[in-house]
Amino acid sequence: MSNKQEEPKYLLANVGAEVDRLTKQHAWLQKCLDGQIVFGPVDLGKPDLRVLDVGCADGILLRDLRKGVAPSAELVGLDVTPSFLPPNDPGPPAIRYAVHDICDPVPANMANTFDFTHVRFVMAGASKSGIAEAVRNLVGSVAPGGWLQIQEMDLSPNTPGCTPALEDMKSVLRSLFEKTGADPLFAKNLAKMLEDAGLQNVAVKKVKYWVGKGMGENQADVEASIASVKLTIPAILGGAASTFALFRFLVNHFE
């Protein structure tokens, strides 16, 4: 597939700044996850391992993952935004990229072939097809015996232990998702969607992403978590066409 396609409308504002934001977000999330990327029983040492990252942006997760896989593994990144994608990387292992929308079935040459398909914070962009259909499309990429891992945010209001600033941020995100036609609480229904799409051994793992002092004693980690969220807030507000005053309120509460 050619990457020279018309640039789609991105859910968040300022596409040009997104790669930097997503890179910082990835570093923060991986710190919270102790560097773990794969949570299912995937044999990362398998010589012919095939991995697909959907919504890969500039491939930062695949570049991290390839440090722990065999040189002969095949890594593929898909994203709906052509300008995010870097040139193919010869590796080893090689990483190749292509433009693809999760609202569409994966190309025929990718159907039922991947040992591990990874998706992070992408499903809310599936308003064109609906999230359930996008889940079925993702399931269609997985080889028999393979694993699909979808990571999404629980935006439920009044979460125990959640700070007022984070509650406000979740409220804005819920409004943004509603604006696109997505159920803002869709993450709670993903397990059933996966089962309805034919997957077995579906499990839900809840992970806390700490912001600020919750990151521990390392001041660099504390600052990195806050910086990542502060970059996300204007992107969210730009996508939601919200006010500058609310942006200042949220930023001040994270400082």
Image: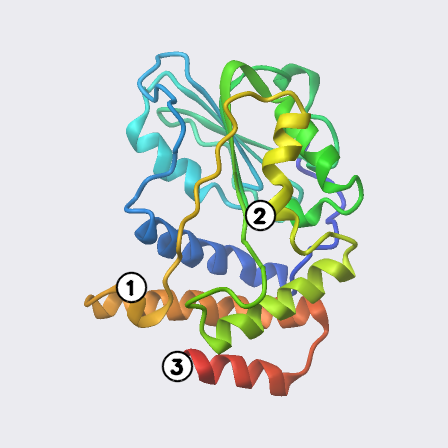
Q: Judging from the image, what secondary structure is the residue with disc 2 in?
A: helix
Which of these two is toward me, 251 or 76? 251
Task: Name the residue at the left extreme.
Answer: 217
The quarter of the picture where residue 249 lies is: bottom right
x and y, in percent, of residue 180 in the image: 77, 56
Residue at 46%, 67% in the rendered image: 229
Q: Residues within 10 Å of mark 2 (few under 14, many from 20)?
A: some
Q: Is residue 30 left or right of residue 157?
A: left
The image position of residue 95, as x and y in percent, is 46, 29
Measure how far apart labels 2 and 1 are at the Cα level. Answer: 29 Å
Which of the two marks, 2 or 3, is nearer to us in this view?
3
Q: Earlier in the sequence, mark 3 or mark 1?
A: 1
Q: Residue at the spot x=20%, y=66% of the render?
A: 218
Cβ atoms under marks 3 and 1 closer than 8 Å: no
Q: As drawn, is 250 to the left or to the right of 184? A: left
Give the class, few, some or many, for how many residues have Cα within 10 Å of label 3's Cα (few <14, many ≥20): few
In this rendering, the label closer to the viewer, 2 or 1: 1
Q: Is residue 154 visible?
A: yes
- At a point 45% along the width and 82% down the height, the residue shown is 253
> What SS does tag 1 mark?
helix
Pair 3/1: label in front: 1
User: Which residue in the structure is indicated by mark 2?
Assistant: 84
> Would residue 178 be found to the left or right of residue 216 on screen?
right
Query: How far apart in space, not on screen, are marks 3 and 1 (Cα)?
Result: 14 Å
Quarter of the picture containing the C terminus is: bottom left
What mark, if any, has residue 215 been given in the picture? 1
Give the SS element for disc 3. Answer: loop
- Residue assigned mark 3: 255
**Residue 222, picture quadrant:** bottom left
- Residue drawn 43% across the image and 65% down it: 228
Residue 196 versus residue 119 in the image, above or below = above
